[in-house]
Image (spheres, grey):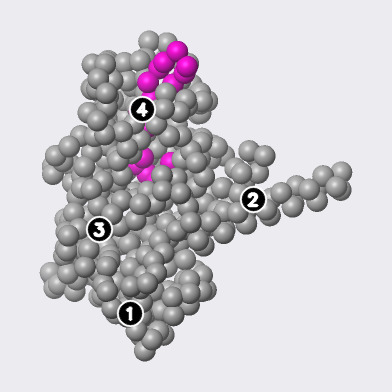
Amino acid sequence: MKTLKILTAVAFVVILSAFVVKSINPNKTGGTENGYGNGYGIGDIAKDIRLKNINGEFVTFSDYANAKGFIVVFTCNTCPFSVANEDRIIALDTKYKNLGYPVIAINPNNPEVKPGDSFEAMKQRAKEKGFTFPYLIDEGQKVYPTYGATKTPHVYVLQKTDKGNEVKYIGAIDDNSRNANAVKVKYLENAVDALLSGKTIEITETKAIGCSIK
Amino acid sequence: MKFYVLIGLFLLLSCKGKNQETVSAVSTGADTLFVTVDYKGLESYLRESNAAVHVVNFWATWCKPCIEELPHFETIREKYSAQDVKVILVSLDFPDQRERLTHFIKRRNLQSEVVFLDDGDGNSWIPKVDINWSGAIPATIIYTDQKRSFYEKSFTFKELEEELKLFL
């Protein structure tokens, strides 16, 4: 038992120090790698999720037998960039749910360090804004690292394939997260539209400013 | 093994920032205590070819972990100005909240140069700032004409000073 404890401690320190070294020498990280380990890339198969929705029920991708895919949005109550995108996320769900790509919103923040992102606060916000989509809590923060999400909002488009839910698009909703009225290119919509019409997605990865996940 | 990676990730991320990110908005006069630029205008701040050590921090008034580390950048500016260290604070506040930025600069009596980056299309310029930047703030660049490092993280004063010393 004692040996196991020591081994655990040693493994822990080694892995932790690997991250520390990486953050101290950021120039040595790979070009396409995100800051926190690998996470999904384009073409990867996303594992199914099982996360609690604001109504207390658990949601999995497999619940959606008729979906063609999913618009997975990491978002939260407290980040101003998330708030600035709430209406856009509702509009995306309204538009694409019926076309087979429902929005699945996931709050990745730890409520212990972000009380404004607690389960109760999520329920409140969803009610106030009239969210039309599931708003799930990433309890234990196990899901967002598998995606490689680093900030809110951060979106992923998945397409159901024979292999599973394949990651087709990663990044921003559009080209102006700070001002909805100034949007010129709707990256996410273009990606889903391409999938719906069987075309190749022109821009598969984009970036936007966001709040680091807490 | 995955379990340990998750624990490591969790610890690393939980170090990044705590608490709320909201700062109450207050209106003040529209004195310009900062320069407004688009990415093209910002580029000159990111690639100055002189002997100085440039510390460029990306932040916003509503970003709690950013606000927590701002005093470290101010202290660095003061402590190392004789060694030709220049600090630039690049604000990513919302374009309709300039007054809030003005008020914040006054209230905190910020001495470092503040640049307001008013350029909506993040996807066009985030990779140009640094290829490894996901877009999350806070983020910092330290550079000279010889050397350059990018950090997508929060700094303690000690950490920031240690990194800076690698450039002096």
Disc 1 secondary structure class: loop
Q: Which residue is mark 3?
A: B93
Disc 4 secondary structure class: strand
Amino acid type at image mark 1? Ala
Classified by dominant secondary structure, the portion drawn in magenta counts as: strand
Q: Residue furthest top?
A: A66
In the picture, the disc for residue B52 is 1
Q: Quadrant of residue B85?
A: bottom left
Q: Which residue is mark 4?
A: A168
Q: Nearer the viewer, residue A214 or B81?
A: B81
Q: Which residue is mark 2?
A: A15
Q: Is residue A92 left or right of residue B53?
A: left
Q: Nearer the viewer, residue B145 or B35?
A: B145
Read off the chain for label 4.
A
Quadrant in the picture for the N terminus of chain A: top right
Q: Which residues are magenta?
A: A149-165
Measure how far apart labels 2 and 3 are at the Cα level. Answer: 36 Å
